[in-house]
Amino acid sequence: MRKLTIRDIMSTDLVTLDHTESIELAEETMRAARIHHLPVLEEGRLVGMVAQSDILRAQVSVFAELSQSEDRAIKQRIAAREVMSTSLRTVGPDTSLLEAAKILADHEYSSLPVVEDGELVGIVTERDFLHLVIRALEDEPKARLDVLGGGADPLVAAVNGPETVVWDGSLRKPGSQEGIRNEERSRSSSNIREDPVATASCRSRTKP
């Protein structure tokens, strides 16, 4: 059975910010795109991340008791590189979901940039993991999951779609010949009739 990786859930439609651009633009971009993190690039290379919390910390420390116009003027003069986080932990597209989830939990990160061959190719967030769990919980009844000793993972079915059927821990599409044969073998093994002679013999030996 194929293990799920970051590639299965990461966002690839990226919105980024140049390191010279202002935190005002960063704030407006996050608001418009309804996101909470912006990868910061320098000549196309990932150099940091700006989060809403970074901008909020700057507002509290620098912009206290300022008018709205003064606040905006200052934000326009502060570059993303001045407030971005540079101690980045990245993952690759083929990193397992379990490993990535542990990184998020252990370090209390809310997002992880996805880098391949030195290039930013995606981002994965806590929300992506939450959506995966929701899909798994919603799709589990529809997916007709049969775990026949193979340890089938309902999350795999959630990613591959609600019409995926899991037979002995591997992925099978409904109506496939292999899936049908596995189902028939499963049903025939579960319908083996009890031998009355053997059963009576066993019962007689167990009487005191």
Image (cartoon, grey):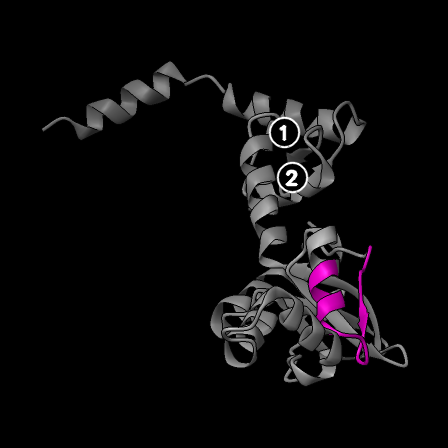
Name the residue type under label 1.
Ala
**Does the segment drawn in magenta span residue 24?**
yes
Q: Quadrant of residue 202?
A: top left
Name the residue type under label 2.
Ala
Instruction: Judge by depth and name the residue closer to the eye, 60 or 64.
Output: 64
* Above-or-below relation of 1 to 180: below
Instruction: Judge by depth and name the residue closer to the eye, 14 or 140.
Output: 14
Residue 183 — which label? none
Q: What's the magenta region?
A: 13-28
- Residue 173 in the image: x percent, y percent? 76, 31
Q: Is residue 118 visible?
A: yes
The reply to whether discs 2 and 1 touch (Cβ–Cβ < 8 Å) is yes
Quarter of the picture holding the C terminus: top left
Residue at 65% over, 45% down? 156
For label 1, the crowd category at 10 Å Cα-Cα, with few meaning under 14, some 14 to 19 and many 20 or more, is many
Q: For the image shown, how many numbered marks are present on the structure? A: 2
Instruction: Judge by depth and name the residue closer to the eye, 151 or 110.
Output: 110
How far, Cα to Cα, is label 2 from label 1?
8 Å
Residue at 32% over, 21% down? 199
- Residue 20 in the image: x percent, y percent? 81, 80
